[in-house]
């Protein structure tokens, strides 16, 4: 998912009070070309970002100028003498700050995908300034009074607000209120200080993590160190070594896409342990890039902020704006699944230990062994070899299959576009069509490189809207696949293919948006709803229609054999103990540490991790999917903080929704597909998420669907 909505949405709607820090200097303005960052995106394809014209050296000037422009727009709204109404206040806010919004999109793209030392320096300098700017927006008293007046009159028949307009008023008001717009001056001043400090800490956390991912790696000196690895993994490791000036050696990069396959297939136990420790200790090495003290400070500041805002903890503040509503509700679901998942882990470990004992090497299963022996169990129980499956998963063909499925389900047609400027030569661009009309652009950035954050995510370049004039969305999907030899197909794992469908689900959510107001459009929904559509989109990968046409052997081009497909399906719930427990360990840690944090106390994140894992009975063979010092979801910004649980909450809905397709006869049932698009993908946040789900399913979610889907006993 989009890594940060920090610069977008209702949080950035309002205006800035007078403050000289935001007046751009004449000298700076005279030397910078800010227009490509700030000007509307026009031209072919309904307009596009001009990466060919922007210079990152001008980005700081453009951001400052954008803030100045928005300041002027908002002063007019807040200072007008006419009584506040929907048009002159809410719509005017929705229409403000467009130049700044375009500029911050560039900023986010560069800091997430091209974050070299110069960009990191700019990010460290400008992020606190942007945070201060947004705090001044939220704390503009005349502005908030106008918003509040419209909110309190929203049900007045004289206003004649339609349901979407009423929803917009409620979302805007609550966003301002829950961020302290109604606090007294003293509390507002402290809140600004806290948010400014947090902005700096988040940036430092990201930079430390990126530094460890770029500088720390597993170097393999001898060809024998590659034992167990497939030819494509060996080629990728050789290419990685060459790019780091270590030609003649092999390098396993310190990212999930490189380290997980190594841990799964390497026969060298000592190297697996070494690689696992490098990977799991990112940000936790007691050096200048160590994140532990940063986490301690973040927790204290969040706790203090929550108290200022009237909540007992940061977790209560976050959950108040999510579907779950309370930490107790989120914990109840997690612990229900935790009991079943850890019981399954005990069974999985017993199966693995039996194989290890049979091999006679005296191995007791440790965390660096889990993936390796799980793969042996998979082959033993299901006769399923992931390396064999990988031979049929070519990146380009899976991409085609992803497009084909989206066409069948949502009526989308993807057309590759040549000649559009991109942030990097690896990025490709597609026009997205539906019903004969272009509905958006999609950018695909597939490969790892220095300066690019790890993992996979969707980013929104431009949000759909139609309230002044129709604006089509522009979105991107970003991955970190490792390039192999030139001219050779990039082979990906089954998990990677699943992730591609997941992230493309987020993209479709943005592309199919069909609402009036950008604040309510696309993926601008509650955190525990945003993962729901994308999780359902994963389900089309396993269908016969996709696999028979697009899972083709990279040499013979023959489709994935039926017997292999049957094995994949039979093994669907295999290793769910590990997968679910690894994730839930992180989600429970996230919730518990934010419930425990106080403004006056210091929490050591490592010690809290050990205590929490002991308290919940985490199996010794498993560690958190994201250990604290690398847990960017919750410490690199506010995004998923006290909210990492949302994936399991969303999966209860996705499991239930998937059963709707099965009940209708299959995942390509036209009526069900159309209803899914119309009730979920197209409405954004113009409809409350619980209502949207009921509109699709005809009832509230059945949480037991999740247990059935993962092969766990239904309580």
Image (tube, rainbow, N blue to C red):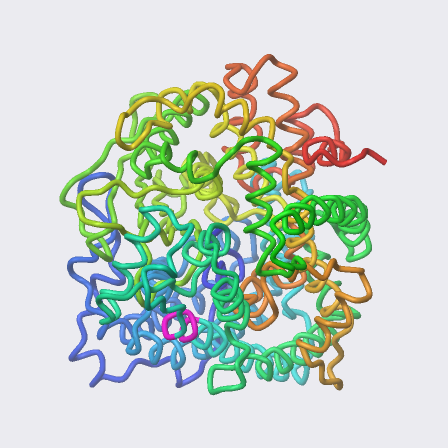
Q: Whole-percent x and y of residue 287? A: 49, 86
* 41 lies left or right of 587: left
* Residue at x 74%, y 58% (from the top left corner): 619
User: In the rendered picture of this protein, how many numbered marks are placed on residues?
Assistant: 0
- Left or right: residue 389 versus residue 363 is left
Residue 328: image quadrant is bottom right
**Quadrant location of the C terminus in the rendered image:** top right
Nearest to the observer: residue 64 or residue 589: 589
Residue 105 locus on image (x, y percent): 35, 59
SS assignment for the magenta stretch, majority: helix
Relative horizontal placement of residue 576, taking residue 703 as reference (left or right): left
User: Which residue is farthest top?
Assistant: 665
Question: Residue extending furthest left?
Answer: 419
Say if 378 sits above or below 117 in the image: above
- In depth, the one of 102 and 395 nearer the eye is 395
344 drawn magenta: no
User: Residue 692: x percent and y percent?
Assistant: 63, 33
The residue under the point 56% across, 57% down is 83
- The percent coordinates of residue 57 (x first, y second) are 22, 75
In the displayed structure, would residue 155 be above or below residue 635? above
Q: Which residues are magenta?
A: 210-215
Residue lying farthest front?
A: 360
**Residue 153 visible in the snapshot:** no
Instruction: Between residue 543 and residue 394, name the one nearer to us.
Output: 394
280 versus 344 height, above or below: below
User: Considering only vertical position in the picture, is 706 above or below 405?
Assistant: below
The quadrant in which residue 50 appears is bottom left
* Residue 362 seen anywhere in this rendered image of the structure: yes
Of residues 670 and 626, which is closer to you in this image?
626
């Amino acid at each position: 998912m989009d890594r940060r909505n920090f610069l977008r949405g209702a949080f950035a709607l309002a205006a800035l009070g007078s403050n000289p820090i935001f007046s751009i200097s004449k000298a700076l303005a005279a030397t910078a070309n800010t227009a490509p960052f700030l000007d509307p995106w026009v031209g072919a394809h309904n307009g596009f970002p001009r990466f060919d014209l922007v210079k990152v050296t001008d980005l700081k000037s453009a951001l400052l100028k954008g803030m100045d422009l928005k300041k002027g727009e908002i002063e007019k709204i807040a200072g007008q003498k006419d009584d506040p109404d929907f048009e002159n206040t809410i719509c005017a806010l929705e229409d403000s700050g467009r130049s700044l919004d375009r500029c911050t999109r560039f900023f986010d793209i560069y800091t997430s995908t091209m974050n070299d030392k110069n960009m990191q320096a700019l990010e460290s300098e400008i992020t606190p300034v942007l945070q201060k700017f947004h705090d001044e927006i939220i704390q503009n008293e005349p502005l908030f009074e106008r918003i509040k007046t419209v909110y309190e009159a929203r049900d007045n028949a004289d206003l004649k607000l339609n349901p979407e307009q009423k929803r917009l008023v409620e979302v805007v008001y609550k966003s301002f209120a829950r961020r302290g717009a109604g606090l007294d001056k003293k509390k507002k001043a402290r809140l600004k200080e806290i948010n400014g400090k947090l902005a700096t800490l988040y940036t430092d956390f990201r930079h430390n993590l990126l530094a460890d991912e770029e500088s720390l790696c597993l170097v393999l000196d001898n060809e024998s160190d590659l034992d167990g690895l497939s030819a494509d993994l060996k080629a990728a490791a050789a290419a990685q070594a060459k790019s780091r000036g270590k030609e003649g050696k092999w390098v396993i990069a310190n990212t999930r896409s490189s380290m997980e396959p190594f841990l799964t297939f390497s026969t060298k136990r000592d190297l697996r342990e070494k690689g696992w420790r490098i990977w799991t200790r990112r940000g936790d090495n007691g050096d200048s890039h160590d994140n532990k003290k940063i986490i301690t400070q973040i927790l204290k500041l969040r706790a203090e902020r929550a108290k200022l805002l009237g909540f007992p903890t940061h977790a209560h503040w976050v959950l108040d704006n999510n579907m779950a509503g309370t930490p107790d509700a989120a914990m109840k679901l997690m612990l229900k699944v935790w009991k079943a998942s850890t019981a399954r882990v005990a069974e999985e470990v017993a199966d693995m230990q039996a194989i290890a004992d049979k091999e006679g090497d005296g191995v007791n299963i440790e965390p660096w062994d889990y993936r390796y022996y799980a793969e042996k169990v998979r082959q033993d129980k299901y006769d399923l070899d992931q390396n064999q499956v990988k031979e049929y998963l070519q990146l380009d063909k899976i991409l085609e299959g992803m497009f084909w499925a989206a066409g069948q389900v949502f009526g989308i047609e993807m057309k590759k576009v040549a000649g559009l400027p991109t942030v990097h030569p690896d990025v490709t661009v597609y026009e997205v069509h539906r019903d004969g009309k272009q509905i958006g652009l999609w950018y695909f950035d597939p490969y790892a490189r220095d300066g690019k954050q790890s993992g996979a995510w969707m980013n929104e370049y431009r949000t759909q809207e139609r309230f002044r004039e129709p604006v089509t969305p522009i979105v991107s999907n970003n991955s970190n696949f490792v390039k192999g030899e030139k001219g050779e197909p990039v082979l990906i794992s089954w998990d990677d293919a699943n992730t591609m469908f997941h992230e493309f689900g987020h993209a479709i959510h943005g592309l199919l948006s069909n609402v009036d107001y950008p604040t309510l459009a696309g993926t601008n929904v509650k955190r525990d709803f945003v993962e729901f559509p994308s999780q359902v989109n994963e389900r089309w990968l396993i269908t016969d229609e996709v696999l028979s046409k697009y899972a083709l052997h990279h040499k013979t081009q023959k489709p994935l054999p039926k017997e292999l497909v049957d094995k994949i399906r039979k093994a669907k719930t295999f290793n769910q103990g590990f997968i679910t427990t690894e994730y839930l360990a992180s989600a429970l840690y996230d919730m518990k540490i934010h419930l425990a944090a106080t403004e006056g106390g210091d929490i050591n994140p490592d010690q809290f991790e050990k205590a929490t894992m002991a308290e919940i009975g985490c199996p010794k063979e498993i560690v958190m999917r994201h250990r604290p010092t690398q847990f960017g979801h919750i410490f690199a910004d506010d995004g998923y903080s006290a909210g990492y649980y949302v994936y399991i909450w969303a999966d209860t809905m996705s499991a239930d929704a998937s059963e709707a397709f099965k009940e209708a006869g299959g995942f390509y049932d036209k009526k069900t597909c159309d209803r899914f698009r119309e009730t979920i993908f197209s409405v954004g946040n113009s409809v409350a998420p619980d209502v949207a789900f009921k509109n699709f399913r005809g009832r509230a979610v059945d949480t037991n669907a999740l247990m059935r889907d993962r092969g766990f006993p239904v309580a």
